[in-house]
Image: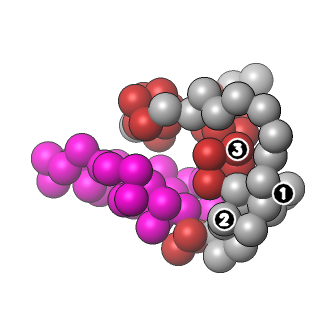
Amino acid sequence: MNSDQDLAHRIKIKFGTAPNDPTPHQLERIKQDIQALVAKGITPSEQDWADIVRKHCPGAGTYLYKGADTSDLITLMQLATKK
């Protein structure tokens, strides 16, 4: 699993996106928005992440995936800002 696939999976679990979300295009837009905040010196909060994910994946929050949620914000941030 590459870092984009890992990030997409973690977003799906943490934010309850549809089974096929985020798509590669949605994921790229999410990463761009997160990177824009980081470039401004802002450390994205969980609410920032949720707002950005909902912006690009409108169905976020309507799905629930059972199991342990290991998608902490630090890991998401590292994956989203990885070059």
Picture residue at 60% right of the left edge, 28% below the top? 70
Of the 4 image quadrants, the one containing the N terminus is top right
Instruction: Give residue 65's position: percent from left, percent from top.
Output: 80, 46
Amino acid type at image mark 3? Ile
Amino acid type at image mark 2? Gly
Tell me how far mark 1 sits from mark 3, CA to CA: 12 Å
Q: Is residue 73 above or below residue 45?
A: above
Picture residue at 74% right of the left edge, 68% below the top? 62
Q: Secondary structure at mark 2?
A: loop
36 in magenta: yes
Q: Which residue is mark 1?
A: 20
Tell me how far mark 2 sits from mark 1, CA to CA: 14 Å
Assess disc 3: are there few (<14), some (14-19) or many (≥20) residues with their C-alpha within 10 Å of its C-alpha: many
- Give the extent of the magenta segment: 24-53
Q: Residue furthest top?
A: 1
Is residue 75 toward the left or the right of residue 68 in the image?
A: left
Q: Nearer the viewer, mark 1 or mark 3?
A: 3
Amino acid type at image mark 1? Asn
Instruction: Give residue 30's position: percent from left, percent from top.
Output: 51, 57
Picture residue at 72% right of the left edge, 59% below the top? 17
34 in magenta: yes
Question: Relative to the observer, which residue lies in front, 47 or 10?
Answer: 47
Instruction: Give residue 33's position: percent from left, percent from top.
Output: 39, 60
Tell me how far mark 3 sits from mark 2, CA to CA: 10 Å
> Which image quarter: residue 77?
top left
- Residue 31 appears in the picture as rendered: yes
Return the mark for residue 61: 2
Q: Which residue is mark 3?
A: 13
Is residue 14 toward the left or the right of residue 23 in the image?
A: left
Instruction: Give residue 34's position: percent from left, percent from top.
Output: 38, 52
